[in-house]
Image (spheres, rainbow, N blue to C red):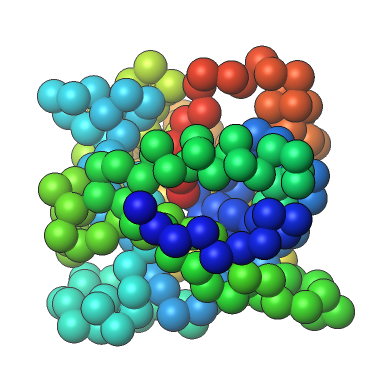
């Protein structure tokens, strides 16, 4: 089990996938910003019970250490220097509970790491954040993917939480709204390909506005989302 390095009074969690619009339980502050030294890719076949099935797992994002990514022949050969997302501070009285919950979710090839998080508001200091990384040696890590084949797979996949392509579109839109330069070329390219595959009636990307994030926050606080925290570790 990973060492818990953070003071119980200041426990911060970094979300780079669905956590951007689907907050974790028991947080009291959310800050937009970025981390460095990593690359975000749709290279994890983890979504067996939300955006896919055990027979046909969906695809979700994971983080890869930049030094390892640079050793690969990725069809998306360039990438941003920063990985944008959202940092959440967990309420002090709930830190132990959330840490235990997250420890359980460390299975399936994800590893806990800590890294500096830089708020979009430059007046704020950097924060040491916990982040889950899908290690390359885990069985659900797929490695480099052909972008067109990956987009087609995402468009085909569906599970109890809905279509895998909705996850892609929601991530695309949520990233745009984090701050200046917060987009992700890999995510954007896959979303563009998915729109072409789905056709003009696909509706593009979901409007993940601050109001939508706020509504999800209220559902989390009220307990409505208990037991259905989708893809909570990213």
In percent of width and height, residue 113 lies at: 43, 65
| Identity of the residue drawn at 25% across and 50% down | 109
| Identity of the residue drawn at 35% across and 52% down | 1
In percent of width and height, residue 107 lies at: 30, 42
| Identity of the residue drawn at 75% across and 56% down | 9
| Identity of the residue drawn at 54% across and 44% down | 99
Q: Quadrant of residue 119?
A: bottom right
In percent of width and height, residue 196 lies at: 35, 45
Q: Quadrant of residue 87?
A: bottom right
Whether residue 131 is situated above or below residue 224 in the rendered picture: below
Q: Residue furthest right?
A: 123
Asked if residue 209 shows in the view, the reply is no
Asked if residue 47 shows in the view, the reply is yes
Instruction: Decide if residue 68 is on the left or right side of residue 111.
Output: left
Instruction: Decide if residue 109 is on the left or right side of residue 118.
Output: left
Whether residue 13 is situated above or below residue 218 in the rendered picture: below
Instruction: Decide if residue 156 is on the left or right side of residue 223.
Output: left
């Amino acid at each position: 089990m990973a060492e818990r390095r953070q003071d119980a009074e200041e426990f911060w969690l970094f979300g780079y996938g669905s956590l951007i619009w689907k907050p974790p339980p028991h947080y009291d502050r959310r800050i937009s910003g970025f981390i460095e030294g990593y690359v975000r890719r749709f290279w994890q076949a983890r979504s067996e019970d939300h955006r896919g099935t055990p027979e046909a797992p969906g695809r979700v994002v994971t983080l890869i250490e930049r030094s390892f990514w640079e050793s690969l022949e990725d069809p998306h050969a360039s990438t941003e220097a920063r990985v944008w997302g959202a940092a959440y501070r967990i309420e002090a009285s709930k830190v132990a509970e959330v840490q235990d919950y997250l420890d359980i979710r460390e299975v399936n090839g994800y590893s806990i790491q800590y890294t500096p998080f830089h708020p979009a508001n430059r007046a704020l200091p950097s924060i040491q954040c916990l982040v889950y990384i899908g290690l390359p040696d885990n069985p659900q890590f797929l490695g480099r993917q052909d972008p067109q084949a990956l987009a087609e797979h995402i468009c085909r996949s569906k599970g109890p939480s809905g279509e895998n392509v909705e996850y892609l579109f929601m991530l695309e839109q949520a990233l745009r709204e984090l701050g200046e330069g917060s987009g992700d070329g890999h995510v954007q390219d896959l979303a563009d390909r998915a729109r072409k595959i789905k056709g003009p009636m696909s509706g593009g990307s979901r409007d993940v506005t601050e109001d939508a994030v706020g509504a999800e926050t209220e559902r989390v606080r009220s307990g409505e989302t208990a037991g259905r925290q989708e893809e909570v570790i990213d």
